[in-house]
Amino acid sequence: MDDSKLFELIEKLPHIPKCQVQHLVIGLVIREKEGGSTDFDQYNVLMADDFNDPMKEFHDYMYTISVDFVNKIEKLPISKQKIIEKMVDEMLTLPESQTI
């Protein structure tokens, strides 16, 4: 498939799948740059000022949990975050009939 056809198909995608394509391409470019490629040096705008921005931008298609809840958890000390993570891990091992 030539590039123009690929770009045409991407343009026809709804917003969320188009964001997924964008996220995939950015991830691949970052991996290439980390591997020593200089082909993408002119594209320094790929990284957001806030490292968490890209994850929050793609939140709608990646998660079913609210961004507000995630932000609250991120404000907790790491020790408290680990407690929440342990609780979630335990809940994930329970049969569905025993979960809330």
Image (tube, helix red, strand yellow):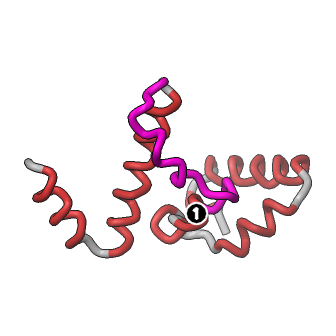
Asked which quadrant contains residue 32, the reply is top left
Residue 52 lies within the magenta run: yes
Comparing 60 with 30, the one in front is 30
Q: Which residues are magenta?
A: 36-53
- SS assignment at label 1: helix
> In the shown orientation, is residue 94 left or right of residue 62?
right
Q: Residue drawn 83% across and 52% down?
A: 81
Q: Residue furthest front?
A: 42
> In the shown orientation, is residue 88 left or right of residue 58?
right
Q: Residue furthest top?
A: 36
Q: Is residue 12 above or below residue 51?
A: below
Q: Is residue 15 above or below residue 95?
A: below
Q: Which residue is mark 1?
A: 97
Residue 90 lies within the magenta run: no
Predominant SS of the magenta segment: loop
Q: Is residue 85 above or below residue 19?
A: above
Comparing 34 with 19, the one in front is 34
Horizontal and vertical percent position of residue 85 = 75, 50
Q: Residue drawn 45% across and 67% down?
A: 61
- In the rendered image, the quadrant that contains the C terminus is bottom right
Horizontal and vertical percent position of residue 76 = 88, 59
Q: Residue drawn 55% across and 67% down?
A: 57
Q: Is residue 25 above or below residue 17?
A: above
Asked which quadrant contains residue 84, the reply is bottom right
Comparing 34 with 70, the one in front is 34
Label 1 neighbour load within 10 Å: few <14, some 14-19, many 20+: few
Horizontal and vertical percent position of residue 94 = 63, 52
